[in-house]
Amino acid sequence: MAASLGQVLALVLVAALWGGTQPLLKRASSRLQQVHERTWARQLLQEMKTLFLDTEYMMPFFLNQCGSLLYYLTLASTDLTLAVPISNSLAIVFTLIVGKVLGEDIGGKGQA
């Protein structure tokens, strides 16, 4: 079964949403404030509050989850042997591109 152009574009969009948000999530999570509570339940609630109120973290997280939803919907009509390689391999490419744009050291030439 050959994939349509729409299916391939949906998988590329999935890759962009997954890969493009990874460096943003990494950056935002490194800036989150640390919380310390006495009980595990209060700790969990405080950590969730901290995450949900941080728009710098929540926006890329929301976009990443939209990519997962689109992937799930696309899998209903796309061959799995096509969907997985396209989305996963391109996600790595998008992660590298966005990471480079954000100034991350992605390695490469001249690295030890």
Image (cartoon, rainbow, N blue to C red):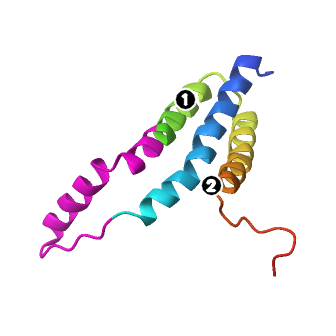
Q: Is 7 contained in the magenta span? A: no
| Residue occupied by mark 1 | 70
Q: Quadrant of the N terminus?
A: top right
For the point 58% across and 55% down, the residue is: 23
Q: Give the image location of residue 111, x and y in percent.
A: 81, 76
Query: Where 60 sits versus 105, above or below?
Result: above
The crowd level at tag 1 (other Cα within 10 Å; few <14, some 14-19, many 20+) is: some
C-alpha distance separating marks 1 and 2: 25 Å
Q: Give the dominant element type of the magenta stretch: helix, strand or loop.
A: helix
Q: Give the image location of residue 9, x and y in percent.
A: 71, 25
Q: Give the image location of residue 28, x and y in percent.
A: 45, 57
Q: Nearer the viewer, residue 6 or 94?
A: 94
Q: Which is more N-terminal, label 2 or label 1?
A: 1
Choose top left, top right, bottom left or bottom right for residue 42. Answer: bottom left
The amino acid type of the residue labelled 2 equals: Leu
- Decide if residue 109 is in sight here: yes
For the point 19% across and 61% down, the residue is: 46
Q: Residue furthest right?
A: 109
The crowd level at tag 2 (other Cα within 10 Å; few <14, some 14-19, many 20+) is: few
Q: Which residues are magenta?
A: 33-62
| Residue occupied by mark 2 | 102
For the point 69% across and 22% down, the residue is: 7
